[in-house]
Image (cartoon, helix red, strand yellow):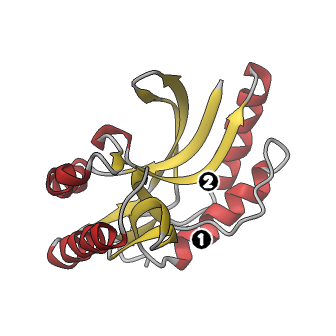
Amino acid sequence: MRVFLAIELPNQIRDNIKKLIYKMEPYSKYIKLTPIKNLHFTLKFLGEQNDLSIEKIKEKAKNEIEKIEAFEIEIDKSGIFGNIKNPKILWLGQDNADFVLSATKINRALDMFRFEPKTPVCHLTIGRIKSISVSDMTEVLGICKDFVNKNNLRFCASRVYLYKSILSRNGAIYEKIENFKMKGSCWDGQK
């Protein structure tokens, strides 16, 4: 089973991002847009795991996540992975030290199942870029920047979900198989 740990977006944020996806439709021949229901902040991709490993992952994830304080995410940036001449991924996200620290702790606790040497980045993949001109990519980045500047895309990350990823001809289907609660809340005076 292919699995990963991620933070789910609240419905209000998803509904806002639907507006951006709608504005991106003219560019859909260049960008494979992520279905709204699949948007999430990945903390740890674990890849293919057997049933025994998944039970151990649940146990180790629970132990680590219960120690992590809930934290705020405010989507206030957009960008690409790759470069303007050869972009690969269009994303929305934030420079977020709490996310990086939390993801790093989770990664270390679960490295025995899949090692990830890269520093985690707090981002949502809005789309995978097939091929696009520099001028069209510049327009898309402008649309995304305008979107994050005009919308309040702030929420409290207080739960982490273990998802199963089922690959199909029509794209990935994500199914929650476990959830873990972090300590505290973002707005209860603890932060």
Q: Which mark is residue 122?
A: none
Residue in the foreground of this view, choosing between 10 and 20: 20
Bin the neighbour count of mark 2 within 10 Å (Cα to Cα): few under 14, some 14-19, many 20 and up: many
For the residue marked with disc 1, what is the amino acid? Val
* Three-letter residue code for mark 2: Ile
Residue lying farthest right?
112
Residue at image point 31% right, 38% down: 37
Observer-side mark, 1 or 2, equals 1
Query: Compared to 97, does 61 lie above or below?
Result: above
Say which residue appears at 52% left-offset and 24% top-offset: 166
Q: Which residue is mark 1?
A: 100
Q: Is residue 96 left or right of residue 112?
A: left
Badge 1 local density, few (<14 within 10 Å), some, or many (20+)?
some
- Picture quarter with the C terminus: bottom left
Rendering coords of residue 172 (x, y %): 46, 30
Image x and y of residue 118, in percent: 71, 65
Secondary structure at numbered mark 1: helix
Tell me if residue 99 comes above or below residue 28 in the rendering: below
- Towards the viewer: 56 or 47: 47
Residue 164 image point, x, y percent = 55, 29
Would you say the residues marked 1 and 2 are in contact, meaning their CB atoms lie under 8 Å apart?
Answer: no
Image quarter hosting the N terminus: top right
Where does label 2 land, which residue?
Answer: 65
**Mark 1 to mark 2 CA distance (whole Å):** 13 Å
User: Against 34, is 163 above or below?
Assistant: above
Circle 2 sits in a helix, a strand or a loop, which is it?
A: helix
Question: Can you tell which quarter of the image residue 143 is in?
Answer: bottom left
Q: Residue at x 61, y 65 (%)?
A: 102
Q: How many marks?
A: 2
Of mark 1 and mark 2, the one earlier in the sequence is 2
Vertical order, 21 against 150 (above or below): above
| Residue plotted at (77% across, 33% down) | 56
